[in-house]
Image: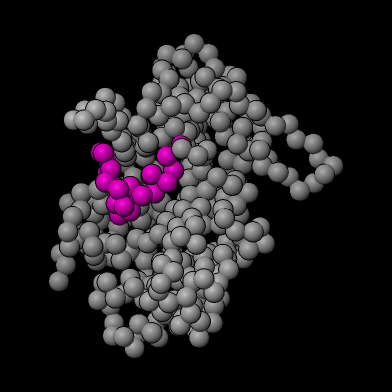
Amino acid sequence: MVLKENTIQLNNPDNLLEVRNLKKFFPIQTGFLKRVIGHVRAVDNISFSAKRGETIALVGESGCGKTTTARSILRAIAPTSGQVLFGSKELGVVDVAKLNGRRLRTLRREMQMVFQDPFTSLNPRMTLLNLVSEPMLVNGVGTHSERVDRVAELLRLVGLRPEYMRRFPHAFSGGERQRIGIARALALNPSMVVLDEPVSSLDVSVQAQVLNLLMDLQDEFKLTYIFVAHDLSVVRHISKRTIVMYVGKIAEDAETEELFNSPKHPYTAALLSSVPIPDPRRKTQRVVLGGDVANPADPPSGCYFQPRCSFSEEICRTTAPRLDELSSGHSASCHRSREVELKGI
C-alpha cells in the first residue's frame, strides 16, 4: 500500500498542478576538468497552476524554455530549484521535483507525454500492440490478454482499427502515428498529459483532426493538458489559458481569448501580429522585432525583452519587472503594461 503525502497542500483544491519558482539552469563547462564558467538560464523562476480538466498552453519563440518547463514538470529532467506540486490519486499532493525511486515511478502513471515528432518517437521494430501496451507491461498492469483488449480499446478511441495492432509504425501516415502516440499516453489512465507541439509536423487538415480528437478525449476522461506550441492559431483553438514565455521567464499569463483580444506585453502583441488572418480584404500591421532573442547564458540587465522593445524606457534597462496581476486572471511582466495600448486579434 502506498502512503499518501499530507505535508504539502495546493493553494486551490481545484488545481491538479502548481509550479512554484521553478528554475532549470544548465552549466557551461570548459577545459579538461570541465570547470563551470556560467549557466544557461533555460527556465528562470516561473510560477503557474493548472486546474483539473484544463488546457494550459506554453507559447513563445524557439529557445524560450517552454519544452524545458514541460520536461521539468514531468521530471524527465531534474529542476535546479523550485517546486512542482501535483495532486496524485495514489500519493496525495507531492512535490515532483523531490520524488525518487518507487514513489516517482508510481507517479509516472498519472503524468504522460505526447512527443513532437511522430516518426522518431515510435520504435520502428515494435508493433502497435507492443508500443501501446509497453507502459502497462513496465508497470505490471494486467495480464497479456487484458493488455491486448486494452490496446484494442485505445486504438478505437483514437480512430484506428484494432486489427492494426499487429502492424509496424512504417505502415502509417504522420497523423496516424501521432494517434498511436496519443493512445500510448492514455494507456495508464493518466490525470495529466504534456503535449509537446503534437501537431507542428502535420498537415493543416490533419492538425485539425488531431486537435479535435484531443479535445474529445479531454472531455471524456477529464484530462489536464500542458500544451507546448508556437502556433498561436492552434493555441487559440484548444487552450483555455495561455502562458507566453520569453528567455525562460513568463511574459504574460491570461485566459486565451482575453490575451488574444487585449495583450498587455509588447512581446505578446508581436507574436499575435504574426498570426495569419483568413481574410484577404483585411489588412494587418505586422510588428517586426529588431535584434536577436536574448542569450539565456548572458541575459541583458533589467527586462530581458528591452533590447527589442519599442516601448522601453530607462527603468526597463535597469530594473527587472515583476509578473503583476493587472486584472482577475491576467498578469504581465512589463513596467508599462498599464499605460501602453497594444493591438490584439
Taking the spot 33% from the left edge, 64% from the top edge, the residue there is 110
Q: Say if 191 sits above or below 297 in the image.
A: below
Q: Nearer the viewer, residue 20 or 7?
A: 20
Q: Is the residue 82 above or below the residue 152 in the image? A: above
Above or below for 16 versus 286: below
Tell whether 103 sits left or right of 259. Answer: left
- Residue, x 37% and y 61% (percent of image)? 112
From where the camera sits, is residue 68 visible? Answer: yes
| Magenta-highlighted residues | 64-86
Res. 129 image quadrant: bottom left
* Tag count: 0
Q: Position of residue 20 (x, y in %)?
A: 31, 41
Can you give x and y, in whole percent of width and height, for residue 240 in the image? Answer: 53, 52
Outermost residue, front side:
32
Between residue 294 and residue 228, name the one nearer to us. Answer: 294
Instruction: Find residue 291 and report its horizontal and vertical position in percent.
Output: 56, 23
278, 328: nearer the viewer: 278
Report the residue that reaches farthest toward the bottom.
145
Horizontally, residue 277 falls left or right of residue 171, namely: right
Residue 8 seen in this snapshot: no
Which quarter of the rendering shows the C terminus?
A: top right
The residue lying at 73 percent from left, 45 percent from top is 277
- In this figure, which colouring scheme has been used for the structure? one colour
| Occupied quadrant, residue 340 | top right
Q: Quadrant of residue 269?
A: top right
Residue at (40, 86) in percent of width and height: 149
Compared to 324, does 239 lie above or below? below
Where is residue 41 drawn, in percent x and y? 35, 32
> Is 85 colored magenta in this rendering?
yes
The quarter of the rendered structure image containing the N terminus is bottom left
Is 89 part of what is drawn in magenta?
A: no
